[in-house]
Image: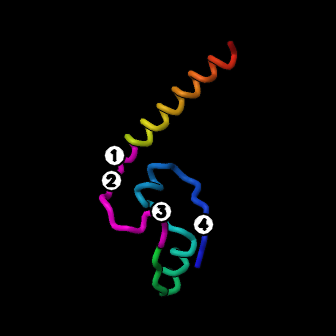
Amino acid sequence: MGMDLYAGTLTRYYAHNWKTEAQLWAEENGFGYQKIGPDSEPGEEMSSEEIRQAVEKWRDNLLSAIREHGSRIGS
């Protein structure tokens, strides 16, 4: 059993383009590895480009909301 903290881009995270330390260890030592998490059910996979666009939209909306609230706070 392993628990890892991911510290990378959201695009790479949602594309599942990374391996945990436990997964790397299992591969190096000839053990099986099964990742279990909240998104363990098989679902529609998004391409890296679709993920990047969704992350950029989320970021832009978040920045817009911050700017809007920031201008109200200073008033």
Residue at x 52% of width, y 81% of height: 26
- Secondary structure at badge 3 equals loop
Whole-number angstrom distance, CA of label 3 to CA of label 2: 15 Å
Which mark is drawn over residue 46?
Answer: 2
Q: Nearer the viewer, residue 28 or 72?
A: 72
Q: Quadrant of residue 67?
A: top right
Whole-number angstrom distance, CA of label 1 to CA of label 2: 6 Å
* Number of other residues with Cα within 10 Å of mark 4, as a class: few under 14, some 14 to 19, many 20 or more: few
Q: Which circle, 3 or 2, is nearer the viewer?
A: 2
| Marks 3 and 2, the one that precedes in the sequence | 3
Residue at x 51% of width, y 75% of height: 23
At label 2, which amino acid type do we have?
Met
Whole-number angstrom distance, CA of label 4 to CA of label 2: 23 Å
Q: Which residues are magenta?
A: 36-52
Q: Nearer the viewer, residue 28 or 62?
A: 62
* Number of other residues with Cα within 10 Å of mark 1, as a class: few under 14, some 14 to 19, many 20 or more: few
Whole-number angstrom distance, CA of label 4 to CA of label 3: 11 Å
Q: Position of residue 31 (x, y in %)?
A: 49, 86
Picture layout, residue 9 above or below residue 40: above
Picture layout, residue 33 above or below residue 54: below
Which mark is drawn over residue 18?
Answer: 3
Q: Position of residue 61 (x, y in %)?
A: 47, 31
Which mark is drawn over residue 26?
Answer: none
- Look at the numbered discs 1 and 4 and tell me whether their residues touch, using CB distance below 8 Å: no
- Look at the numbered discs 1 and 2 and tell me whether their residues touch, using CB distance below 8 Å: yes
**Outermost residue toward the right?**
74
In this figure, which residue is indicated by the disc labeled 1? 50
At label 4, which amino acid type do we have?
Asp
| Marks 4 and 2, the one that precedes in the sequence | 4
Residue at x 40% of width, y 44% of height: 52
Picture layout, residue 53 above or below residue 13: above
Q: Which circle, 1 or 3, is nearer the viewer?
A: 1
